[in-house]
Amino acid sequence: MSIDWKQYDPNGFFDELIASPGEARHPAGPLIDYLSELDAKELEARRQMAEATIQEMGVSFTVYTEGGNIDRAWPFDIVPRVIGAKQWKRAEQGLRQRLKALNMFIDDLYNDQQIIKDGVVPAHIIEKSKNFRRECIGMKPAYGVWAHICGTDLVRDGDGEFYVLEDNLRVPSGVSYMLENRAITKRVLPELFERKDIKPVHNYPARLFDTLVAISPRRVKRPEIVVLTPGIYNSAYFEHAFLAQQMGVELVEGSDLVVGDDDCVYMRTIAGRERVDVIYRRIDDMFLDPDVFHKDSVLGVPGLMRAWRAGNVALANAPGAGVADDKVVYAYVPEIIRYYLNEKPRIANVKTYLCDDPEQQAYVLDHLDELVVKPANESGGYGMLIGPHSTKKEQAQFARLIKENPRNYIAQPTLSLSTAPTLVSKGKVEPRHLDLRPFILQAKDTYVTNGGLTRVALRKGSLVVNSSQGGGSKDTWIVNGEE
């Protein structure tokens, strides 16, 4: 038996591949036709091939538990997600616009603060931000860019349009899984890649390398670039090692680097010290430099901020970029875009309630059973209240938290997240909710990936897509054609 698409029911949600029972959306037509030709036995064989490929390639992620750290194989679904190129072009333009404005905003905050003086963003929002770094005031990174690598989370609501759910500007992760998803899919469904219209993603490491070269303070033919990792126990260590290997640069830990008396950064090698020009850091601000931030940090490099402020090393992303990562700041991004670019936002935000506004807080407290409540600076899906799936006890707890620290919370409507067919058992597909994290690079030029990392909630009815909480992933295809 092959998949019976007439029986596939997305339960009223916008489905990415299926427009109505038995009818594929135009860009997904060839994929649906192909899958219809595979019987249950063949589909299961392809799924097992994917699992074997993941084991062979060593694609894993780390989950922190009370008992220690557990490495898990990457959870992967073989049915790709398909997006029409015309719609993606509009989203890409919106992502470029958004990161440009956010970088202008960050640069303004650490210098003139004109946006605050003009009353567009309230001063207390920045003053109370956990990620505003006073140590960065007065800095002017190359091209005015603080966030060189951004992962912006997009969702599609019931209308099929993309909305920005959040921006990740500190140390965004996941791009290696986007690349590995494509490599796995090419092995599992090779026939489909005879099509010429599936947009490639393989050039991301080269574009990342070019971005890092562009911000080197020294104009040399081959700047020394390193990837700074917290080490093998970090949940994203696989990605750190993968990107360093793909770019052909050194993967280092804090103990491998030293800041000299000349305020330059050097890498310890068997041939002696070598000067480092650019550090792609995968360590949070507070652990970067024990001379400035956490005094007991063994992950960072003493004197690193001194070298950066002296203009002798570039840091990507720059310290302090996370001030725009704040979910409260997120609510102001449409106005930030209008202020700096004098343009209308090309991708809308999800409607957001600010709990430090008395009127909006009152609404949130009265509708906790309907809303999603998020803390301003948590990530990974932690610390959230998903109203419709919450208990009265949990709602009471969040009401107390909001009242105690209203600046730290926002609320949003529970979205009708789009779905896509996902293989759940032998020959059987069911709809599962998903999101999308494209990656945007900015320095002298701006680059947006073709699609991004699609994360899928593998549990039926779940809206939680994070791999650490039971989510998985699938390949994302941008193909010619409109939906």
Image: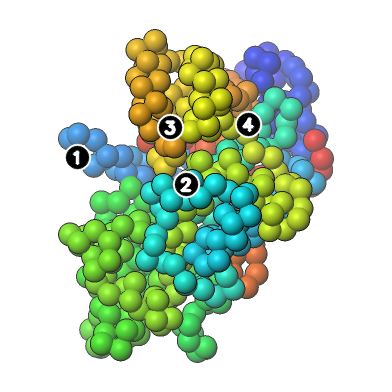
Q: Which of marks 3 and 2 is nearer the N terminus?
A: 2
Residue 68: mark in rendering? 1
Q: Which of marks 3 and 4 is nearer the N terminus?
A: 4
Please tell me in which quadrant of the rendered image residue 378 appears: top left
Please tell me in which quadrant of the rendered image residue 312 appears: bottom left
421 sits left or right of 130 in the view: right
Label 1, residues with CA under 10 Å away: few <14, some 14-19, many ≥20:
few
Q: Do the residues labelled 3 and 2 touch (CB within 8 Å)?
A: no
Q: Are marks 1 and 4 in contact (CB under 8 Å)?
A: no
Which residue: 42% across, 55% down?
A: 132
Front residue of 46 and 30: 30
| Residue that numbered label 2 is attached to | 124
Residue type at the position of mark 3: Pro
| Residue that numbered label 4 is attached to | 351
Q: Earlier in the sequence, mark 1 or mark 4?
A: 1
Q: Which of marks 3 and 1 is nearer the N terminus?
A: 1
User: What scheme was used to colour the molecule?
Assistant: rainbow
- Assign a secondary structure to mark 4: loop
Which residue: 47% across, 46% down?
A: 124
